[in-house]
Image (tube, grey):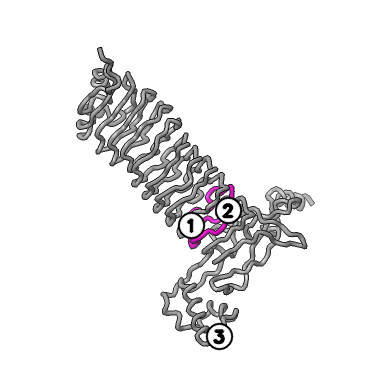
Amino acid sequence: MTKKLLFIIVVVLNGIKLFAYDFSAACTTIGKNNIEYRNSQTIYYNITDSVKRTVEVTYRTFDKKYELGLSDYAEWIEIPSTVEYKGTLYTITAIGDYAMNDCCLGRPMYKEPSFYKRIEHINNKLASEGISLTQQEIEAIHSDDFSDYNTLSNSREYCIGITSITIPATVTRIGRAAFKGCSNMKVIYGGSAVTQIGDYAFEDCSELYECLVSKSLKVIGNGAYSGCTNIRRAFIGDSVLSIGEGAFAYCYNLTELMHTSSVEEVCNIAFLQCFNLEKIDVPSIKSIGGAAFHHCHMLKSFNFSDSIYFIGEGAFSYSGLTSVRIPKLINRINYSFDDCPNLETVFIPSTVTYFFRSFFDCPNLKSVTCEAVEPPSSLDGAFYFYQCMEGPCIPDYISKVKLYVPCNSIEMYKTYRSWNGFGEYLPIPSSCKEK
């Protein structure tokens, strides 16, 4: 009796139920020319509010060890706006956590990577003979009966998974890792009412070429599009205040961000290694996280508005910036702009009091303007190491850089460690009062 009671308690505490979903319903997948390429697909649902009659799309079963939702979703998925269950009509308002992630796992592997070409080939062959494509022929795709289409590609096992998803206007939330690892998904249709994209929702969807577009969007979670290497342009949304950690990290081909006027915070590594990012305008930005634009080689300019109060470590390291104007609310900079090969000019307001390797290894630097009357302190130096084993470690290019400082501070900068290696010391014109 005690053992049975203990088992029941363990089951309840772990939230175990007979199924990982409340109910399921068939959803036919429609392809080109209204042809059903599969007889039907099953979509799994959880009831989220029995009073409001709302449900979310979920997985068939869940692998706790690897945090994977296992289902058999494949190809074209069109999520309906409503679904009926036991005589009650429910509205679909969310795609739940892990609902369709790693959509190939747990599914049988197909032969031949040219799946769609073979369907088209068979369809054309039958049509030329005046025969309509039937379900029997569709099912024959998975057999070896059609020997002549084997020449279309080399035979190998692989999984198609989801190739496109249509999200109805009733859905407002896409959950954590909902589509993570759906590496063959290319297109997202609909989703105009989505307000929240959860953490890692589309991570590693490497074939996805466009982000979800929703004017209602407010939250872009951590890693939401990380590893989406095929995305060229990203729609952020005019109501989004924060871009999550690593939200677009490793999106190597991302070139442009659109509708970013409301963004106030770009979190750590948000655009890490977005090598081709060229254009971003965030006029309301206040905080830039560590390594936010690290290795953004094509990013030549950035509007450093005076509303910015924080720039994290490595925020623009290895970027393509040509000019940096530190905002007035910043008082310390920790290697935020090191290794910027194209950087030519730097402006530092009087509010900055501390540096730590902030502008190391910027070989094309031509001029620096520092408004501080007293040279800002520095650990290890701001533009170069001020002390090595055998003396100052001043790179050759520093001797060609012009340093502009307040008129009465020139001699102080010349003798102050980490500021005494520049080629020329010139007065800031506006700082010199006429006698």
Q: Amino acid at mark 2?
A: Ser
Q: Residue at x 38, y 43 (%)?
A: 294
Q: Is 186 in the magenta? A: yes
Residue stretch rendered in magenta on the structure: 178-204
For the residue pair 400 and 356, the one nearer the viewer reads as 400
Numbered label attached to residue 354: none
Numbered label attached to residue 192: 2
Q: Label 1: how many residues lie within 10 Å, few (<14), some (14-19) or many (20+)? A: many
Task: Calculate the distance from the C-alpha at mark 2 to the C-alpha at mark 1.
Answer: 20 Å
Numbered label attached to residue 131: 3
Q: Secondary structure at mark 1?
A: loop
Q: Position of residue 20 (x, y in %)?
A: 66, 57
Q: Are marks 1 and 3 in contact (CB under 8 Å)?
A: no
For the residue pair 61 and 114, the one nearer the viewer reads as 114
Say whether residue 183 is left or right of residue 393. right
Task: Calculate the distance from the C-alpha at mark 3 to the C-alpha at mark 2.
Answer: 40 Å
For the residue pair 85 and 126, the one nearer the viewer reads as 126
Q: Secondary structure at mark 2?
A: loop
Name the main secondary structure of what is drawn in magenta: loop
Image-quadrant location for residue 376: top left
